[in-house]
Amino acid sequence: MTGPAHKAIIHRLYDEVFNQDRLDVADELARPDFAIHDRASDQSVGPDAIKATQRRLRAAFPDLQIHIEDMVAENDRVAVRWIMRGTQSGEFMGRPATGQPVEQHAIVIFRFDGDRLAETWPVVANAR
């Protein structure tokens, strides 16, 4: 696969799974052994890891939207810089609901195996 094809898959991940809350799309995009390398992850693997992340985010931010700011692809890797915005209506990372708008920034590196997501390394900044 090429960089543009990998980028298209990342766009689907954020647009369809996260912004539209279509969890079933994760089954198409991720390998069965997909791994999230992050301490905050619940250590699920495969598409279930993506679904668990989305459920956790959606519980805290029912109106969440993720906007991709930058994306770079090379070989089997794609790096994404994004901003998530939403209203914190539920607990998030130990913080009780505030009812306030939140903006979260992140840089995430994905590794592909062919046309499927294999691993990811997220670096998330503190919410504002």
Image (cartoon, grey):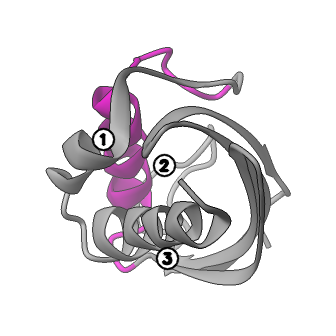
Span highlighted in magenta in the image:
40-63
Kind of element beneath mark 2: loop
Q: Quadrant of the C terminus?
A: bottom right
Q: Name the residue tied to disc 1.
A: 51
Q: Name the residue tied to disc 3.
A: 99
Residue 86: numbered disc: none
Q: Amino acid at mark 1?
A: Lys
Residue 41 seen: yes
User: How far across and down, in percent of the image, does residue 54 sit?
Assistant: 37, 50
The number of numbered badges drawn on the structure is: 3
> Earlier along the polypeptide chain: callout 2 or callout 3?
2
Q: Are marks 2 and 3 in contact (CB under 8 Å)?
A: no
Q: Name the residue tied to disc 2.
A: 91
Which of discs 1 and 3 lies nearer the camera? The answer is 1
Kind of element beneath mark 1: helix
Q: Nearer the viewer, residue 101 or 77?
A: 77
User: How far across and down, in percent of the image, does residue 73 sit?
Assistant: 75, 62
Q: Crowding near pointer 1: few (<14 within 10 Å), some, many (20+)?
A: many
Dividing the picture into quadrants, the one containing residue 3 is bottom right
Q: Amino acid at mark 2?
A: Glu
Distance from Cα at disc 1 to Cα at disc 2: 18 Å
